Image (cartoon, rainbow, N blue to C red):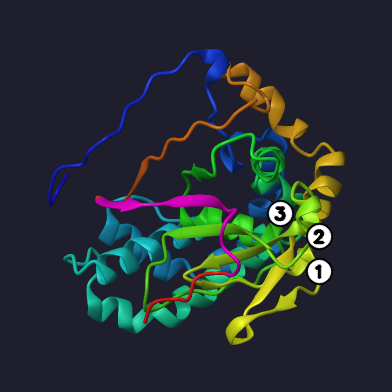
Amino acid sequence: LPYGVQPVPIFTERKDGDGVVFGYLNCRRLDILQRQLRDHEKWRNEERQSEGLLKLLSRILGEKIDLDDLRAVYDLHMAEKVYQQRTTINQTVWETHHTEIEKLISFVVEQQFSSWELVRLSVGLFPPEVLQHIQKSVLSESKKLAIYNGDRIFFQSILKFFGAPIKLNTERMPNTLSIEIFKNKTLPSHSASSPSQYFVRFEYDLPVICGGCGEGIKRDGNETVYGLDDFLHFLEKENEMNWWKECAAVVEALEVPTVSSELLDTCAIGVLGGLSLFFGFKIINYLTQEKPRKKRN
């Protein structure tokens, strides 16, 4: 790579034990819908109006940049800025055009999540895997930590799926989206294996509001947490509709189980524009803690 060595983690596993969960890259129906978006007159009008900017970015980056590439371009610039690397896009050029770039990214996000079908298919096999793993965790039948590799674009799909707002972070580069499950020790011990014994906290750099999980409960520092019952009800409702079958044909063709029986405790390193960044999604089940840990100053 231009500025250093890129470590590539490699693991081997039997085909029947492979727990890889494919997201938005493997769904034929999603591909069709996204092509329809790009062929729509509204999208083409936006491309025509931003033609000069897209050509400028293409010239700087050495490859053709379209509207739907702008989120990756934005992430590249932010990663270089946050990790104090030499910027690929000249700072003067960025300062001149960043408002237009952010406006175009907002347009792209709005269009790519303009229907629930687009939102749901964009997270692929992720929801049924999460549902399965959490149900096992509550019954103490599996490990307490699962890590899913992804990127910030996939994180946006997950946030949108759970009904959380998507905001561009212009100062930091958050790289971990977490769902933490805590035991409510104030409830009777005889209900220890019941989902009502637990609550859930979302965090992506800062606590996340989960619009699909009910009103939530206000806790320390006015933070909102959600009952595990509500969280599971939301996932079960979506799982009943079998959205994941839209992705099944492609996944089966790749000889990966449609919905794996157990997640692999693996993590990977995502590469964004030559920078090594760790992207992860984790589910943590703290069976012994009474409340979420305080954030460090």
- Residue drawn at the location 64% of the way across and 34% of the way down: 141
The amino acid type of the residue labelled 2 equals Asp
Q: Earlier in the sequence, mark 2 or mark 3?
A: 3
Q: Residue drawn 39% across and 77% down?
A: 296
- The residue singled out by tag 3 in the image is 119
Q: Residue at x 58, y 86 (%)?
A: 221
Q: Amino acid at mark 1?
A: Gly
Residue 136: x %, y % from top left = 68, 38
Q: Is residue 183 above or below residue 107?
A: above
In the picture, measured across the screen, residue 149 lies left or right of residue 236, that is left
Crowd band around label 2 with a 10 angstrom C-alpha radius: few (<14), some (14–19), many (20+): some
Callout 1 touching callout 3 (CB < 8 Å): no
Q: Mark 3, residues whose alpha carbon is within 10 Å: few (<14), some, or many (≥20)?
A: many
Q: Is residue 13 above or below residue 74?
A: above
- Report the predominant secondary structure element of the magenta stretch: strand
Q: Which amino acid type corresponds to the residue marked 3 in the rendered image?
A: Val
Q: Secondary structure at mark 3?
A: helix
Marks 1/3: CA distance? 19 Å
State the image coordinates of residue 286 (x, y, percent, origin top left).
56, 55
Q: Which SS class for mark 1?
A: loop
Question: Which residue is the extreme one toward the front?
Answer: 189
Q: Which one is nearer the viewer's eye here, 279 or 156?
A: 279
The part of the chain drawn in magenta is 275-291
Q: Secondary structure at mark 2?
A: helix
Q: Which label belongs to residue 230? A: 2
How many marks can you see? 3
